[in-house]
Image (cartoon, rainbow, N blue to C red):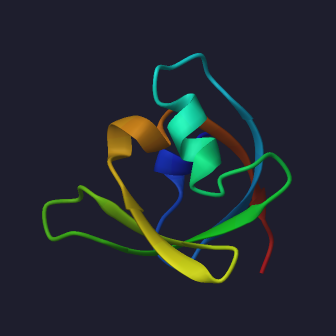
Amino acid sequence: MTLQDLQPGESGKILDFKPSPVTDRLMEMGMLPGSEVQVVRLAPLGDPMDLKIQGYHLSIRKADAAQILVSKCES
């Protein structure tokens, strides 16, 4: 599953990235394999996503979130 598939309140552990030109930039922002990321909320039209990762908030487009493979964390 991808990060885009998670709903607000759900968390996932980053497994890997699909090949994308934004992969390096996402990794620079702290989205590293093994990190846990939580979807905090979605914008009114669903894009961008507000995420919490490594103690800070990050907003990314759903198209970019679709490039991040995650495993859903059970609550």
Q: Residue at x 13, y 61 (%)?
A: 45
Q: Residue at x 15, y 70 (%)?
A: 44
Residue extending farthest front? 28
Q: Is residue 64 above or below residue 60?
A: above
Q: Residue at x 53, y 58 (%)?
A: 6
Residue 27 image offset from top left, x and y in percent: 64, 44
Q: Nearer the viewer, residue 54 or 50?
A: 54
* Left-right relation of 35 to 59: right
Residue extending farthest left? 45
Q: Nearer the viewer, residue 21 or 17?
A: 21
Q: Is residue 40 above or below residue 24?
A: below
Quadrant location of residue 38? bottom right
Q: Is residue 63 above or below residue 9?
A: above
Residue 28 image offset from top left, x and y in percent: 61, 48
Q: Residue at x 80, y 72 (%)?
A: 74
* Left-right relation of 30 to 33: left
Locate the C terminus by quadrant.
bottom right
Residue 73 image offset from top left, x and y in percent: 78, 66
Residue extending farthest top? 19
* Left-right relation of 61 to 26: left
Count of picture labels: 0
Residue 25 image offset from top left, x and y in percent: 52, 39
Locate the N terminus by quadrant.
top right
